[in-house]
Image (spheres, rainbow, N blue to C red):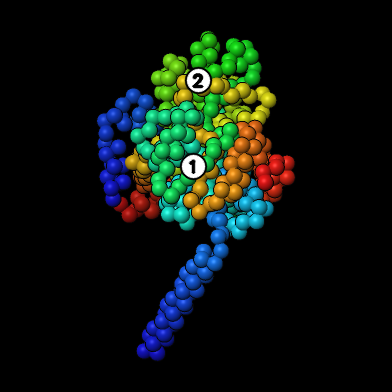
Amino acid sequence: MTHLRFAISASAIGALTLALGGCATSESLEGNSSSSETIVVGSQDYYSNEIVAEIYAQALETAGYEVERDFRIGQREVYVPDIESGAVDVFPEYSGPLLQFWDETTTATFEDEVYAALVDAAPEGVRILDQSAATDQDSYVVTKALADEYGLVTIADLAKVDEPLTLGGNSEGEDRPNGPKGLKAAYGIEVDFTPIEDGGGPLTVKALKDNQVQLAIIYTANPAIADPELVQLEDPKGLFLASHVVPVVSDKLDARAIEIINTISAALTAEGLVALNTQSIEDEAPASTVAAAWLAEHDVS
Amino acid sequence: MNLLAEAWAWLTDPASWTDGGIPERIAQHLAVTFVVVVIAAVIALPAGIAVGHRRRGGGWVVATSGAARAIPTLGVLTLFALWLGIGLVAPVLALVLLAIPPLIAGAYAGVAAIDHSIPEAARAIGMSEAQIVGRVEVPLAARTIVGGLRSATLQVIATATLAAYISDTGLGRYIIGGLKSRDYAEMIGGSVLVVALALILDAAFALALRLRIFRTTTSARHHERTAL
């Protein structure tokens, strides 16, 4: 009996603590948002995305804005509702995937049509700022040796290769439009497929250099793409969905804040993003350090 | 529940069983498992039996094989692949490393558990060391050695899914491919197949031990005869 009573009172205290804790949290949250014009910057749970978010955040802070970081929120299904509700004010996004999230029926793949469609597809209260030249999308990569031997510049040039080609990439590529089926449909080129499940990482690069695969899917923001022995093939037919880094913001941002972020996008090049990612991986530097170093080199104020 | 029903639909879809489908994947999976267990047995069984026979270094064997079980196979596979490239060689080597500890432990424990007086008696009647090992100790330890083989086979068949990480081989293709393309029916279906294969092989080992396909101790056989 005593045991039971003790258990009940203990759980009552527990519940009370929880309730009090809950009050305190919601109070402080309200206090924050009403007292000042804090800008909430969010990021995906992806190191490269976090670096770009950190650049936005530090640039806004330098300009005197109050910034709250809500980084590593997770994947699109999780954070897009926060952007739509205005809980997050600035978010570095990727044009193609975000467009497909909002408009499942879209057929746009080229960078400009994707951007135009994205601006149209954005819901009320959400603004799409200028897209940067930096991309993080699939691309086909071959060795420089193969490219030189057959004069490969675009994916279509693969037709000139008179030896059998094997494509290496994550296994989902086998059935997706960026795999052998899409390559056949868009360019009429037939290739075999070998799964290498490290997302264009060191195993994929080694397989390319060992000529175990002749063609691999490597993301354009992957530091491996800067390897001088590798060549990225151009995609004139838009097989790959364009995926430019594009800031998505709420209407809480004033003209000056928008100007700052647009200046960052203008300064962020494709090679620049790869360099940021390389620094993060090779120096194991935190996003804040990498972002600060980039801002020191680029005048965005 | 819905996902399980979809997985069942995937498993029973005739299209899954066509050329290059489930039967081929199962055959590849069993082939990888077989090759790995044979290589590991050729290395581990003589080593385990030798240590058990000498009755020295046992603590070292138990400690090392225990520690080796903690090695993450995917990490080893990645290391081997960075050295040897993609394909089947790296996963086979990584799986051999996985299979060796239970095999060595089983062989050592089986031989070392034999009463001292038995190999000594064999020596006394003039058997050579090779004869003692081959005719006395291995038959007496057979059940434990097969136990190690059974445990190694189960671990390998479950982990051979990793072969699909860098090669177009085995049931792991369904699991990894299904996971990455969010085709969870395929992923669960592939897992069910791996579980089913493991259970069937385990049952085969249990049956083999029951039917005494492997030689057991003479005294055990004697008891059974009198019981009958």
Q: Which mark's residue is nearer the viewer, 2 or 1? A: 1
Given residues A114 and A263, the one toward you in this image is A263
What residue is rendered at 59% in x and 49% in y? A257
How crowded pointer 2 is (Cα within 10 Å; few <14, some 14-19, many 20+) is rated as few
Q: x%, y% of residue A150?
A: 59, 11
Circle 1 chain: A
Q: Are marks 2 and 1 in contact (CB under 8 Å)?
A: no
Is A290 positioned to the left or the right of B182 in the image? right
Q: Nearer the viewer, residue A218 or B53?
A: A218
Tell me if A287 is positioned left or right of B13 in this view: right
> Mark 2 to mark 1: distance in Å?
26 Å
Q: Say what amino acid the circle numbered 2 marks.
A: Pro
Is residue A290 in sight in this rendering?
no
The picture places residue A249, in percent across and down from the top left corner, at 51, 48
For the point 46% across and 72% down, the residue is A22
Q: Nearer the viewer, residue B132 or B56?
A: B56
Residue closest to the far bottom: A2
* Image point (42%, 29%), residue name: A108
Residue density around tag 1, few if under 14, some if 14–19, many if 20 or more, within 10 Å? many
Q: Is residue A182 above or below residue A297?
A: above
Q: Earlier in the sequence, mark 2 or mark 1?
A: 1
The tally of labels here is 2
Q: State the quadrant of the N terminus of chain A.
A: bottom left
**Tag 1, which secondary structure?**
strand
Spot occupied by residue A65 in the image (x, y as percentages of width and height): 62, 56
User: Which residue has dot 1 on it?
Assistant: A128
Q: Which mark is residue A236?
A: 2
Quarter occupied by residue A186: top left
Name the residue rendered at 35%, 50% in the picture: B225
Residue B51 in picture, x, y percent from top left = 63, 47
The answer for which chain carries disc 2 is: A
Disc 1 marks which amino acid?
Answer: Ile
